[in-house]
Image (cartoon, rainbow, N blue to C red):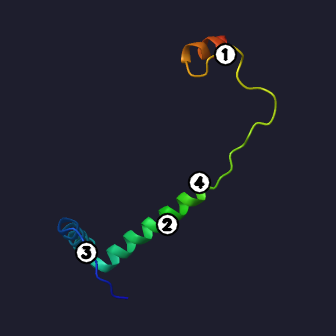
Amino acid sequence: MKITLNLDDHLLADAKALAAQQRTSLTRLIEEGLQLRLRAKASAVKRTSARLPVLRGPGGLVKGVDPLSNKPLLAALGDDA
């Protein structure tokens, strides 16, 4: 399929130079780039669909410990830190 693209002049020059260096066509270089981006997007979607485990048991924050400050959290950990 033929298509018209508007590319930045410097990007096009770099792409042509890379295609010549790799002894391939500009079309093939662009196709490979698109395939890489599409595969990366597909794998990113798969990674984000993972379910995270949720603790349903007792627990939580210790009374009197401010979770927004590191000093009280470290003090509550004591020797376990």
State the separation of the CA atoms marked 4 and 3.
Answer: 33 Å
State the separation of the CA atoms marked 1 and 2.
Answer: 43 Å
Please give the name of the residue rendered at 55% of the width and 18% of the height, measured from the top-left corner.
69
Q: N-terminal of the two: label 4 or label 3?
A: 3
Q: N-terminal of the two: label 2 or label 4?
A: 2
State the separation of the CA atoms marked 2 and 4.
Answer: 14 Å
Which mark's residue is nearer the viewer, 2 or 3?
Answer: 3
Q: Residues within 10 Å of mark 1 (few under 14, many from 20)?
A: few
* Residue type pointed to by label 1: Asp
State the separation of the CA atoms marked 1 and 4.
Answer: 33 Å
Please give the name of the residue rendered at 49% of the width and 62% of the height, measured from the top-left corner.
41
Which residue in the rendered view is the most extreme toward the right? 57
Q: N-terminal of the two: label 1 or label 4?
A: 4
State the separation of the CA atoms marked 1 and 3.
Answer: 60 Å
Which numbered dot is residue 6?
A: 3
Q: N-terminal of the two: label 1 or label 3?
A: 3
Which mark's residue is nearer the viewer, 1 or 3?
Answer: 3
Q: Circle 4 sits in a helix, a strand or a loop, which is it?
A: helix
Which numbered dot is residue 48?
A: 4
* Residue 24 in sight here: no
In the rendered image, the vertical position of residue 60 relative to residue 48, given as above or below: above
In the rendered image, the vertical position of residue 33 relative to residue 51, given as above or below: below
Asked whether 24 or 56 is in front, the reply is: 56
Q: Circle 1 sits in a helix, a strand or a loop, which is it?
A: helix
Please give the name of the residue rendered at 59% of the width and 54% of the height, measured from the top-left corner.
48
Q: Residues within 10 Å of mark 3 (few under 14, many from 20)?
A: few
* Residue 40 in sight here: yes
